[in-house]
Amino acid sequence: MPTFYLDDEPIEFEEGETIIKAALRHGKDVPRYCYHPALTVVAQCRMCLVDVTDMGNGRPAPKLFTSCSTPAMPGMKVSLQTDKVKEGQNIISELTLVNHPLDCPICDQSGECDLQDYAFQYGTGHSEMTHEKRTYGWRDVGTYIMLERNRCIHCSRCERYSKEVEGAHDFGVFLRSHETTFDTFEDHRITHKFQGNLVDLCPVGAITEREFRFKKRAWKLTRTPSVCASCATGCNITVDHESNRVERLKPRENQAVNRWWMCDDGRIGYRQLNDREHRALEPQARVKGELIPANWETIQLAVITRLEEISARGDQVVGLADTTATNEELFLFKKMLVDCFGAKTYSPAHPQQAAPTGHFLNDLISPDKTPNSAGAKALGLGMDLKNDGVRKALEKSPKVVFVLGNPWSENSQLLALAAKADFVCHIATFSSPWVQITDVVLPGATFAEKAGTYTNKHGRVQRIFPAVNPPEDCRDQTRILLDLMRGLGISTEFNTPVQVLNGLGSQEAAFKGLTWDTVGTSGQPLAGIKA
Amino acid sequence: MLQETPILTKNIRSPGYDGSLEAYQKAGGHKALEKALKSMTPETVIEAVKESGLRGRGGAGFPTGMKWGFMPKNTGRPSYLVCNADEAEPGTFKDHFLINRDPHLFLEGLIIGSYAIGCHHAYVYIRGRSQAPAARLQTAIDNLYKAKLLGKAILGTGFDLDITIHRGAGAYICGEETALLESLEGKRGQPRVKPPFPATHGFNACPTSVNNVESLANVPIILNMGPDAFKKLGSTNNSGTRLVGISGHIKNPGIYEVEMGANLKSIIYDLGGGMRDGKQIKVVIPGGTSSNPLKPEEIDIAYDFDAVAKAGSMLGTCSLIVLDEDTDIVDLAYRTIVFFNHESCGQCTPCREGTFWLKNLVRDFHDNLGDQGKIDRIRRVAATMFGTSLCALGDAAAGPMKAFVEKYPEEFRKHFI
Amino acid sequence: MVGFNDAVMKEVQGLFKRYPKKQHALLPILHLVMRENQGCVPEGWEDYVAELCETSLNHIRGVITFYDMIRKEPTGKFHIRVCTCVPCGMCGGDQIKNHIIKKLAIHPGHTTPDGLFSLEEVQCLAACDKAPLIQVNGNNPEKVTEESIDIWIQEMRQKG
Ligand SMILES: Cc1cc2nc3c(=O)[nH]c(=O)nc-3n(C[C@H](O)[C@H](O)[C@H](O)COP(=O)(O)O)c2cc1C
Ligand code: SF4
Ligand code: SF4
Ligand code: SF4
Ligand code: FES
Ligand code: FES
C-alpha cells in the first residue's frame, strides 16, 4: 500500500483516498465540519486545513490544502502542527464564529459541539467582531426537530443528507453570500422518520431534537453501547442516561448494520425505558383471586412449591416467550422447560420485510417490531406465524404455563385457553393482559437494564449492556430464570448472561463459535450466515 | 506615442464593418476554420495553439493549448467546449465588445477549438442581463447554421457541431469556471471542489474545457498568421495582443488593442487620453476589481502578466480602472467589498464570513466611524482570508482590501471617528 | 394560470434537446417563465418547473434565490437597472440612482404604482466605458445624465 506521512508518522492509504479519510482511519483527529464519510465532499468549511510540506514530488504546496478534498500521494508529507496550519485553523475558527451567537449556556449541543470543541482547541480565544451579527428566529422544521439558524455554520451536511441519503431533499439551501440559509421550504415541515439523523449530522446546535430540548446538559450524560430494541434491524446505539434516567438513544456507527443512522421511532424508544406507569414493578402473587405484592424469596419458594404440587410433565407444561427476550434468556427459558418438564417453548413469529427497496434508510425499518425473532428461531423455538402450534398446545389444556415477556398478549383467544391452566407463571417487564390471568408476576428488566445479545433480522448477534439500574424490585430475567432452575433442582454453571452466551456456542449449533468477546462491539453473524 | 495594434479588432476598426456573416467572410473570415478542418488534425491544431504561447484571457492566464492538451481522449464520453462570456468582473467589457461588434471571430475560434478537443456540442455561457448581446449572438449562430458552418458535416468534412447559448441569471461567481459548469447544469452557481478538474469531470461529469471569449477569438488569428508570427507579438511569455478596457475618470474610455507588454502609463495617456479635466491619477486598478490597486508612481511598467504581477497586482482581465485625485479611496474600497460580498456564493467560511465582516469594517470608515484598530483589523481579516477560501473569489476580495489599507492608510485616517 | 401554453412548450422541448439532462435546462426555462410572466416567477410556478425539469422543489427554490435576476414580483413595463458598481459608482452612479429614486418616487426593488417603471440597483453590466449608465429591459446599457433621464422618463410616460 502506498504511504504518506502525517507529522512524520507513516499513514497507508488506498489509491485515490483523501488525506482526511486515511488519517481518520488511522485514528488521527483532523478538525472538520463539512466532511462526513456518508456524504459527498464539498470542502466548504475549510476547517480541515493541512500544511503539505511535500506534495510527494519534493515541492511544497503553494498554500494550505483542505485534507477532505486532497487525495493522498505516495511520499506526501503532511502536517497538522506547523505554524502555518495552526494559523489557518485559527483563522477559520475565528471566521466561523463571526456570525455565531455563542449561546452555549442554553444550547443543547453544548458539550458535544464540534464548534465549541474546535474553537477551544484551535481558536484564538478572543474575538474582534464588534458588528451586529445576523440573526434569525427558531424554525419549526419537522415533527421531530427544531432549527435555530443563528447557530448554523453552513456546513451543508443537512442539505446533502436530505438529498443524498434520505432522498426527499426537504432540507434545502437558499439565498447566497452571508445570507445563505439552510432550511426547509417555506412552512414545509419534515415528517419522515429519519429526522433525528439530521440532529446527529449537524455539528452544532442548529438542528436539535424536540424531545431533548432544554432537558439535559450533554456532558452529564453517560453513553452505554447497546442495540435498538424497537425493531428487528437492531441498529447499533448508545443509551444516553443520567441519574438512572434514559434521556435519549443515539445511533452508533456500524457499517454492517445501520451505518451512521437510526430511525426516529427507535429514538423515541427511550420513553418506554423510563416508563413506570405501565411497568411491572414488584413481584406479585394471586391470593384469593387478587394479585398482591410479595418479596422475591417468598414468591420463589411459593412458585417451586406449587410446581412440585402440580408436578406436571410434557404436554402438561407450555412455555411462551416473546421475542423481546435476549438470546440468553430464550435459551435458559427453553432449557428450563426441557430439562425440568420435558416441555416445549413457543414464540410468536412476526411478518418479515418484503424485498429490500434499495433505499438504505427505509430498509432499516423492519415490520417486525421486536429485536430478537431471529434469535428465537435460531434457538429452535416453535415459531408460527398463524399461531397454530401454540393454539394446539394450549388446547391440550396444560396444567402449567410459563410466560416470558408478553407473547400473544393481544390474542384473547389464546389468553382464554391459557387461563384454564392450574398455574400461570409470568416473567413480565411491562404489564399486559397476561397480568389478569397469571398467578405470579416476576418483574424483569428492560434492554437498557441488563446485559445480553439480540440476533437481528440478518442473523447478526449483537450485545446490549446495562445502562441504568432496574427499579428496586425488578430483576434481570437471566437471574430470575437461573434462580427458578436452581430451585427446581437443576444445577447450572451459569451465573451471568455473558457466561450463558459463552456456553451457548457448545449447546446450540446456530451459535457455534460465538462468544461475548468475538461478538464484540459490532456484532457477529450466527454460524452459517455470511457477514 | 503608443498606437493600437489592431489584430482582433482589425475588422471592427475598418469603417462600415457591421459584424454580419457576409462582412466577416468578406474580410477573410473562416479561412482558419477551413484550414483547420481540411488540412489539420485536432492534434496539430492544439500543437499550433500551444506553440503560439496563447495564455487565457479570462483572468488567470493559463496557456490555452496546454488546457486543451490535458483533455483525455477516447473516454467514451462526449467532450465539451464551453465559452465563458459571463464577463462580470467590474471594469471589464472587452468580451461584450467582441460579441457585439464581431461575433463571428470568436465563434470561429469556438468551432476550431471544438474540433481540436473533439467536442460536438459547445455552449456559450453569457451573463443573464445581456439580453441584447445574447440575441445578437443567436442571430450569428443561426446564420452559421444556415451557411452550413454549424450542424452536420461542417464544410463538407465529417465534423459536426452544435452551439447553444446558455444565459446566466445574475451571479458574478458564475464566471468562475466550475461555478459556470454548475450553472450550466441548472444548479446554484457554487464553485466545485478541485480535484477533479473540468478537464476530466466538467459539464455533466464529462471532459470539458472552459475558455474565455477573447482567448477563443485569438485562435483563428493564430492559425492564420502562424504561431511564430503570433509569438512575435507581445513580450516574452506574453504573446499576442490584449483588448484593454479603460474606464473611470479617463478622457476617452473604451477598448484599445495593444501588444502585451506595452507600457501601462502610455496606454492610459496615449490611448486613453489621460485624465479628464487635466487631473492627476490617484489610483489605477490594472486588471479588474480583483486586482490590487497601483499608485501613480507604480504604473510605468510593461502591461503583461509578469510585469504587473511583479508590481504586486495582476493583469487579470486587462481592465484598467483609472481614478483621479478627487477619488475617495474609502468609497472605492467600500464599493469593491460591497461587490464581492454581494457576489460571494456563500458556501465557504472565509469568503462568506470574511466579506461580510470586511464590508462592515469598511462601512465604518464610509460612515466616518473608523479608528486605527479597525484599519489593523481590515488588514488582518483580509490577510487571513487570503489563501483559505475554496475558490479565487475569496482571494480577489481580500487582496485589494489589504492593499487599500496598506497603500492608502492616510485616506482611511481621514474617516476616523 | 400556471403552466406554459403549447407554443412555449415547443420551445421547452427544443431546450431539452440541447442538454444531456432536463435539469440542465433549468435556467433557460426560468427565463421563459419570466418572459411569460412580466419578468418574474409567480406563485405556483416553482412546483411546475420542478416537475418539468424532474427535480425537487427545494432545488428550484435554491436556484431562484441564488440568482439576482430571478424575481418573485413582476417588473414594470420599463425595468430600469442602474449600475453603482465600481467604475460606474466612481463616475456618479449613485447620483443617477438617487435622481431616479427622486424622479420616480420608488426605491430599488419597487415598481411605480402605474406599473410603468421598476428600478433595480445592479453590479457591473460590462459596459463600464459608458459610466454612469442604466440598462432598460434587455437593451444594451446607455450612458446617462440626470437631464437625459428626465427626458427619457417624460417620453416614456407620454408613450404610456
Ligand atoms: C470569481 C471569478 C470570476 C471569473 N469570471 C470570469 C469571467 O467573467 N469571464 C471569464 O472568461 N473568466 C472568468 N474567470 C476565470 C475562469 O475561471 C476561467 O479561468 C476562464 O474562463 C478560463 O478561460 P481562459 O483560459 O480562456 O482564460 C473568473 C474566475 C473567478 C475566480
Ligand atoms: S452550537 Fe456549539 S458553539 Fe454554538 S452555541 Fe451551541 S454549543 Fe455553543
Ligand atoms: S443546519 Fe447544521 S447541518 Fe445544516 S448547514 Fe447548518 S450547521 Fe450544517
Ligand atoms: S471563495 Fe466565495 S465565491 Fe468562492 S466558493 Fe468560497 S464563498 Fe463561494
Ligand atoms: S472538512 Fe474539509 S473543508 Fe470542511
Ligand atoms: S461598473 Fe457599471 S457597467 Fe461596469
Image (cartoon, grey):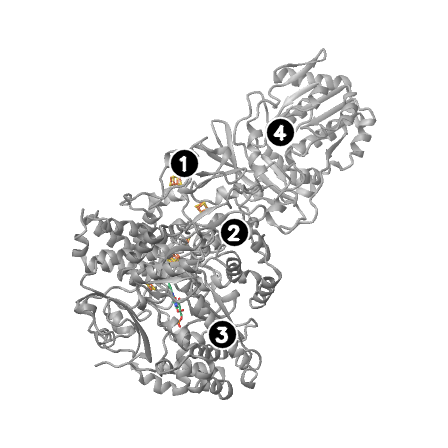
Find out if the beta carbon at label 1 lies less than 8 Å from the nearest ligand 2 atom: yes
Q: Are marks 4 and 2 in contact (CB under 8 Å)?
A: no
Helix, strand or loop for disc 1: loop
- In the displayed image of the protein, which residue is found farthest to the top? A288
Q: Amino acid at mark 4?
A: Thr
Q: Which residue is mark 4?
A: A478
Q: Which residue is mark 1?
A: A107
Label 1 in the same subunit as label 2: no
Residue B330 screen position, x and y as percent: 23, 56
Label 1 in the same subunit as label 4: yes
Q: Chain for mark 4?
A: A
Q: Are marks 1 and 4 in contact (CB under 8 Å)?
A: no
Q: Which residue is mark 2?
A: C42
Q: Quadrant of ligand 1?
A: bottom left
Label 3 in the same subunit as label 4: no
Label 2 in the same subunit as label 3: no
Residue B276 screen position, x and y as percent: 21, 68
